[in-house]
Image (cartoon, rainbow, N blue to C red):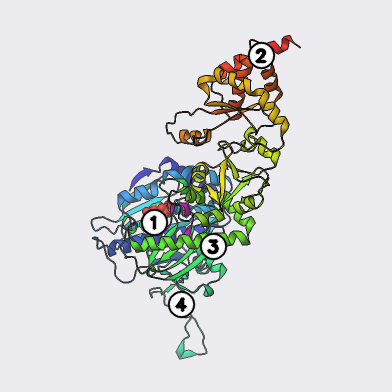
Amino acid sequence: MENHSFQADAKQILKLVTHSIYSEREVFLRELLSNSSDALDKARFISLQNQEHRTIEGDASIRVFFDDTEKTITIEDDGIGMSREEIVENLGTIAQSGTKRFAEALEQGSDVFENLIGQFGVGFYAAFMVADKVSVETLSIKPDSTAIRWESDGGEGYSIGDGARDTRGTTITLHVKEDAEEFLSEYKLKHIIKKHSDFISWPIMMAVTPEPTLDEENEDNVEEVVDLNEEPQLERVNQDKALWLKSPSDVTEEDYNEFFKHVTKNWEDPLCHVHIRSEGTIEFNAILYVPKAPGWQLDNTNYKVDLKLYQRRVKVIEHANDLLPRFLRFVCGVVDSPSVSLNVSREILQNTPAAKAIQKQLTKKVLRKLAEFADENPEAYNEFWEKTGHMLKEGLADYDAKHKNDLLKLFRCKTTTGGDEWRSLAQIKADLKEGQEDIWYLADINKAQIAQRPVLEGFQKREWEVMLLSDPVDEWMVQMVREYDETPLKSVIHGELPEEDNNDDLKEDKEAAEPLVGWLKELFNDDVEEVRLSSRLTESPSIFVSQEGAMSANMEKILRSANQEVSESKRVLEINPSHPMVKTLSRLNSEGKAGLDDFAWLLLDHAEISEGKLNNPQAFAARLQGLMEKAAENL
Ligand code: ADP
């Protein structure tokens, strides 16, 4: 045997696995059986594609044994097996991306760990929850490979040598820790298999204790006769419940929930589900789930959906990304269609008419289901929206927003007048104030400060509700959506707020400040696009807004954070004609007073600061210092 070290990340995870205390260690079996089931799926796929492969005699299955004396549990499958290189790669290293998140999740407690272990692609290591030594015997399906033996105590490393398996597949032997001997029980193992692995479609077989037989010749002498030399009888333990083929009325809520956990390796119940039996041109059955929160890897560009594609109960594709639009990538479940070919690959699926037709129906059904759910369970829906809304909004940001109306019904946001409430567009529209013709929004990815932006002052004064949008996708979304139910959506940064009727004070102030605006335009010249008088400010002396059609500062920020080059567009400076500082400046300026420049520049500085950035902090500091000195002289 040859010794190898575990890769650093793997070592770290193993250390956590072996040193944690668990409340539900039994999940180790679920993880190992799920690996065996995957390995059998892969083997079937290879044989369907007529690739060269090792065949097996009889029906493929998974077998579970235990030995009370040797204190071992063995899980054996006829799956794809592993070559020497594969075993080093698969069991000695772990997928990079998950590690850090996994370690973070672990810090929240070990029960989280038990639930997450499968999702993070480290399921095999769950073996070390109950075993202090694990040995693996494996023979790859590839005809040119040889049998391998792998062994480890879950510490620093593992050893690899020649194995003894002579049929394809993998045998995993767990040398059970002293404190885990409760698992060395037929009853217990069967119970765990039924609880967590009942949906596995491959037969999971266990040796059964022979029924006691009576000594027929001497009926009075009732004695158990067990022939120890006989091969143990194997009995199937799991049921292979293909729920999606049943009629919804025959499936219990509990079954739906259990199946969700099986499919997604999730531990929480889903938010809701839809069971679809479609008999159109493309026939298919599907059970789709909406989880309460989306999976952690779904924001990666190469995300994988948890939607499995079957062809008459045979799993064809594990992550059928092409059956869902990107904005529904959080949806999980299974689709089973006789219209897909058994050896279709992910690449091919994408271009088939079946995939397109199925995607269309799934999308429609999920969106309708969500709308129904939102009506019936607003609180649960809002919690879901908080975690998943940014994905659904991508559907609205899409050029080809086919599902605009359905998606708009699902949309929620916080607003200036709604407090903590998640408001729908229907509510916002219903609550428009008199004189308010548009639905206003402010998009700013600075979530903490968005509600305090001075640009909102005039809206607050009028008690007009403004949508506060702080997801990056919102900028794209509002550009595509434009209106809701014939009411335009308008950006508070771009649009001019109409003047209130009968506000004579403001009219007067504006007239008085006209000459100041002319002077400021000259002074700021190259630094701003325009200087104008504002009707929207109450407290602040000045703000920046964007010209109609120009890119907002928020959009620039988003693009820059995505490493795109954007030249800064010039802003419109709006001055509050009723602000005491502006009034004084206006008066001094018309009196021809010199030395006002620094005061004027402060108006620009102020606008910059309230947008969250200062272009030239040194110049600002110098100005401020000068003005403080002047002020101090007058104290
Ligand atoms: P995951 O299954 O999520 O990828 P695991 O840690 O459970 O993570 O397993 C790592 C890899 O080891 C699997 O992806 C698979 O390639 C391989 N593997 C594990 N168990 C088996 C098995 N019984 N047969 C063949 N390959 C296996």
Q: Which mark is residue 322?
A: 1
Q: Is the distance from the Cβ of mark 1 to the nearest ligand 1 atom less than 8 Å?
A: no
- Distance from disc 4 to disc 2, alpha carbons, whole Å, reads 97 Å
Q: Is disc 2 in contact with disc 3, using a CB cutoff of under 8 Å?
A: no
Q: Tell me the kind of residue under disc 2.
A: Leu
Q: Is disc 4 in contact with disc 2, using a CB cutoff of under 8 Å?
A: no
| Residue 520 visible in the current orientation | yes
Q: Is disc 4 in contact with disc 1, using a CB cutoff of under 8 Å?
A: no
Q: Tell me the kind of residue under disc 4.
A: Pro
- Distance from disc 2 to disc 3, alpha carbons, whole Å, reads 62 Å
Tell me where the magenta segment starts and ends, as one range: 322-332
Q: Tell me the kind of residue under disc 1.
A: Asp
Q: Which residue is mark 2?
A: 627
Position above or below: 565 against 474: above
Q: Is the distance from the Cβ of mark 2 to the nearest ligand 1 atom less than 8 Å?
A: no
Q: Nearer the viewer, residue 625 or 15?
A: 625
Asked whether, in this view, residue 164 is left or right of residue 62, the answer is left
- Distance from disc 1 to disc 3, alpha carbons, whole Å, reads 20 Å
| Residue 326 part of the magenta segment | yes
Under circle 3, the secondary element is helix
Q: Quadrant of the C terminus?
A: top right
- Distance from disc 1 to disc 2, alpha carbons, whole Å, reads 63 Å
Q: Nearer the viewer, residue 399 or 111?
A: 399
Q: Position of residue 549 (x, y in %)?
A: 49, 37
Under circle 1, the secondary element is helix
Q: Looking at the image, is mark 1 or mark 3 nearer the viewer?
A: 3
Marks 4 and 2, the one that precedes in the sequence? 4
- Distance from disc 4 to disc 1, alpha carbons, whole Å, reads 49 Å
Asked whether, in this view, residue 593 is left or right of residue 324, the answer is right
